[in-house]
Image (spheres, grey):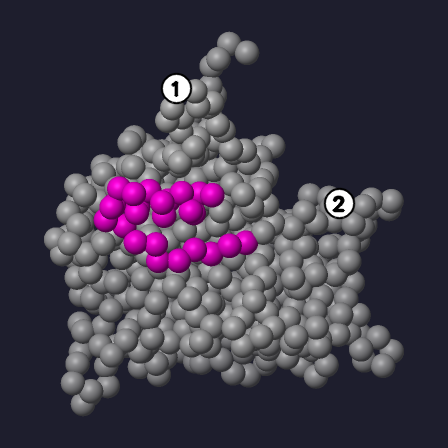
Amino acid sequence: VYIASVQSERLLQPDGSPVPLEWFDFQRGSRPGGSEGLERSQRLVFEVPPGLGFVVGDLIDSGTDQKIQFGGQIADLVQLVVYLRVGDRNAVQVQPREVPLPNVVPCEEHPDCDRDVLRLNEEFEETQRNLLANTPTSILDRRGEPIS
Amino acid sequence: VNGSTSPVDTLADRLQEGIYFRSGERPGPCYRLLLLNVRPGATPADAGRAIDAVWDMLQDLRRGLVRDLRPMRPSDPEVNVPDGRLTCLLGFGARLFDPDLHVPRLVNPDVRPWELVALRRPGSPFPSLPWATEGEQKPGEADLAIQCIAETELAVNLAVVEVWKLIVDQDLPLEVATFHDGFGRADGRSWIDFHDGVNNMEAGEERRSAIEAVIADPPWMEGGTYMSFLRLAVDLASWRRLPREHQEILVGRDKLTGCPLERVDRGQDGELVPVALDGCPVSGAASGSLRPEDRDPPRPGDPLVQASHIHRSNRNRGRPDTPANNRIFRQGYEFLEAITEGGFRLGLNFVSFQRNLKRLRDSLGLKDWLGDVNFGGPVRPKPGEPAPITLISVIAGGFYAVPPKGAPFPGAKIF
């Protein structure tokens, strides 16, 4: 799981202009480059450059008109990406391919959402077991049993 | 037959009229969006009474009753004007909740839906969607928005004028900010000649699940929806300079048949050859008569087609009730207007209804959606591929909270 992008333009400086993307420092990983061109950062550091006379708490999220008070308001602006590699690195020369997102249970609307999510998770785990059907028995599952 | 109502219909009935999402409904071709502001100094009670009076009058108008044509003398006949199947919808803008603009305050700022904010700010309203030039811009935000849709120009124009008359006659604390007009095309195409709104979800429950606010946050909006209005100027001159192949790649459909593209091949001389989905068009079918898979095509494997407008605006191709799919219900109207410098301007009143505004913001703001291009196409085109084009710009726009049906008028409880 990596950080794909951040909606920097939603944050407004005291003069109303949007925050430049450069104020975000993508760390722990690599920026797009090479043949894959994938974003592979795992940490995002955000600060107002020193000397501008204001701080992060003076910024406004233009999507809600709220001043920034909590880190979670910044985290709301971050998009994540999941990369899945299904073989050894360089075993097959292919370009990354986008796969459709599954439908996600809108938990906010369903009181029994927890149960649904658990069921979906179990179904997902089952599909992963099938994928690993031919792997050596030295691989153990969460209970310590060899995966067959 | 026995008068019972299904649970789905009961829920759907909470949405105001004027959102034509139900099976068998088609919006009338005539559109007006009337924007009103509450006069400075008005109290919440004044504002509530004024909105009540306007709403009441509009209900009469829907029955063909006009105030100036009421019988006054014993011998006067009852006069009805053609109602044109008029529908009216009431929305509240962010301005209404702003205590700096209304002294005394009109409503408690705490009941403002947290996403209902002003669109007008420095810079572009969305990352790749700029404002039109200063001289072209018009007001799009106001305290109140009244959407009028009808089968006839008379009905929607009458609604605008009758509201003005009522304000004058009763000295209501309201001011007409402006109105915007539009018309619907019976052929389902837009000014750029392509079919528009082809994949607007199935009528009924699927659409409702994208439209209706189901969370009571704030409580008065549960069962309502959020309207976005963007009056978009289209640079038709630039569009018409593009070869048909480039236009089709930017849109993601065949220009004449409406068939979705599956891939783009290269011809013998390296030219781009858009290839439509297999089996489309259906032999003998009329233009625009598409199969469900042509209306809502699967996500293509070709990156160039993935970058087209129809796949950027509906990127995941998933269920409307999944938040990440950002599905919205569109109900747009074209416009054509003269400009003072001579000539004319044309474009689209982009009108959408969605259960929350984040969906629209994300559609127009996120990278790989429409956040990194103005309309469609690749951000970094390879040789021969269509270059980025600024096709559309915003003349006017605003967000409005559209409360559920209620008496004496929708949303009355916040005053």
* Residue occupying the far top of the picture: B2
Does A58 lie within the magenta span? Answer: no
Residue wearing tag 1: B74
**Residue with the mark numbered 2:** B289
Q: Secondary structure at mark 2?
A: loop
Residue B203 shows in the view: no
Extreme residue in the left direction: B104
Count all numbered tags in the image, as a single digit: 2
Vertical position of residue B292 compared to residue B62: above or below: below
Q: Look at the numbered disc 1 and give the secondary structure of its residue.
A: loop
The stretch in magenta equals B158-182
Relative side of B199 to B353, left or right: right
Tell which of B288 and B94 is nearer to you. B94
The residue positioned 29% from the left and 43% from the top of the image is B169
Q: Is residue B180 magenta?
A: yes
Q: Residue at x 37, y 76 (%)?
A: B123
Task: Specify the quadrant that holds the C terminus of chain B.
Answer: top left
Give the x, y percent position of residue A9.
Answer: 36, 73
What's the residue at 50%, 44% (across, down)? B156
Residue type, mark 2 in image = Ser
Check the image and report above or below for B113 versus B209. below
Residue B390 versus residue A125: which sits nearer the camera?
Answer: B390
